[in-house]
Image (spheres, rainbow, N blue to C red):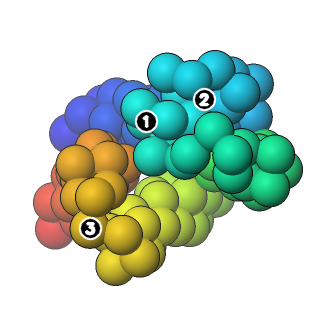
Amino acid sequence: MLTVVQILAVLAALLHGYVFVLESLRFAEPKVYAATFHVEREDLAAVQPWAFNQGWYNLFLAIGTLIGALLLPVLPQAGWALLLIGCGSMIAAAGVLVATDRRFVKAAFIQGTLPALTLLAGLITQI
């Protein structure tokens, strides 16, 4: 079951790494700022610095979660601590996203599902 936790955590990390790419590297593309994030062209200059910063948050969560998954077999306490803070933050951010703007329900579901499954599998592993 530990392998399942690790796989889910790596997938959650990869997803948040992809979000980093969208928010920090590709945000100025109309397909990204308009279609994905519902930002109007005239608001792009004001919103882009915030998106850039938010992308880095997602990358840091991804890195912490990935390291946690890798540490689980060799340093379980450190691995679980990193998974709990990384995945827990991802789930909390998904909640904030949907609470802020109902248009992002699908994105919040995508953002929160893999980390939630990771922690659920981790709970089952510990029982």
Q: Which mark is residue 22?
A: 2
Position of 12 relative to 51 (above/below): above
Quadrant occupied by the C terminus? bottom left
Q: Residue 43: x percent and y percent?
A: 69, 51
- State which tag comes first along the sequence, 1 or 2: 2
Q: Which mark is residue 62?
A: none
> Residue 78, located in which quarter of the rendered image?
bottom right
Quadrant occupied by the N terminus? top left
What's the amino acid at mark 1? Thr
- State which tag comes first along the sequence, 1 or 3: 1
Q: Secondary structure at mark 3?
A: helix
Q: Left or right: where does residue 48 sit relative to residue 78? A: right
Residue under numbered circle 1: 36
Determine contact: label 1, label 2, CB under 8 Å: yes
Q: Left or right: where does residue 97 sit relative to residue 74? A: left
What's the amino acid at mark 3? Arg
Q: Nearer the viewer, mark 1 or mark 2?
A: 1
Q: Left or right: where does residue 115 sit relative to residue 105? A: right
Q: Residue at x 64, y 20 (%)?
A: 29
Residue under numbered circle 3: 102
Q: Badge 2: few (under 14), some or many (20 or more) residues near its Cα, within 10 Å?
A: many
What's the amino acid at mark 2? Leu
Determine contact: label 1, label 3, CB under 8 Å: no
- State which tag comes first along the sequence, 3 or 2: 2
Can you see residue 25?
yes
Q: Residue at x 32, y 56 (%)?
A: 104
Q: Left or right: where does residue 59 sit relative to residue 53? A: left
